[in-house]
Image: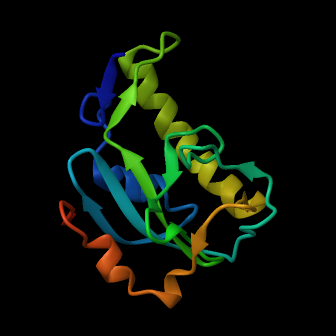
Amino acid sequence: MDFYNLNDLNIKIIDFTMLLSPLGVVKKIVSNGKCYLFEIYFHDKININNGSLKINNNNNIDNTLLSLFYDNNYGIIINDSSCIIQVNNLIEKNSKFTLVEMGKYLRKNIPIISQKILKFGLDLSGKNKTNPDTINIINIINFNGYKKVCL
């Protein structure tokens, strides 16, 4: 399998904060080099139990680049007003898109997915999830190997 990294696609981390802005306000970003975690506070409360967007086994939202961060102890850390979004640094090459087309595709579709999450909600029924307000989220987002990303 061949992969693009975000630098190949000419997408910077600051771009992701803007691409996720239709969904909410990004409060903190950490990275371990393989993926980025975005602590995000939604603009509006979302439906997290019986929304229309499905979450697959890899915690990807509706088969997109965006996924919900899954912690082995807590599960998915989400409530109706905040969550941790995970974006992998490596993106599998798709035979339908060239490098430039893939970058344009992501820039166009991430805001659309963000708007869909707010509008239609997520289907997390049956998934292990933890309310970030009930745990010390700073310890989760600062665990070993992750460093804060300064923009």
Q: Which quadrant is home to the C terminus?
A: bottom left
* Relative image position of residue 75 (x, y in whole percent): 52, 66
Nearest to the observer: residue 25 or residue 127? 127
User: Is residue 38 left or right of 60 when viewed as pictured?
Assistant: left
Image quadrant where residue 140 sits: bottom left
Q: Which quadrant is home to the N terminus?
A: top left
* Relative image position of residue 110 (x, y in whole percent): 54, 45
User: Is residue 47 left or right of 108 when viewed as pictured?
Assistant: right
Residue that appears at 41% across and 14% down: 98
Residue at the far top: name it: 95
* Relative image position of residue 144 (x, y in whole percent): 19, 66
Residue that appears at 69% across and 63% down: 118
User: Is residue 32 left or right of 55 when viewed as pictured?
Assistant: left
Question: Does 60 sit above or below residue 94?
Answer: below
Nearest to the observer: residue 20 or residue 134? 134
Question: Does 24 sit above or below residue 54?
Answer: below
* Relative image position of residue 4 (x, y in whole percent): 32, 26
Image quadrant where residue 56 sits: top right
Question: Does 55 sit above or below residue 131?
Answer: above
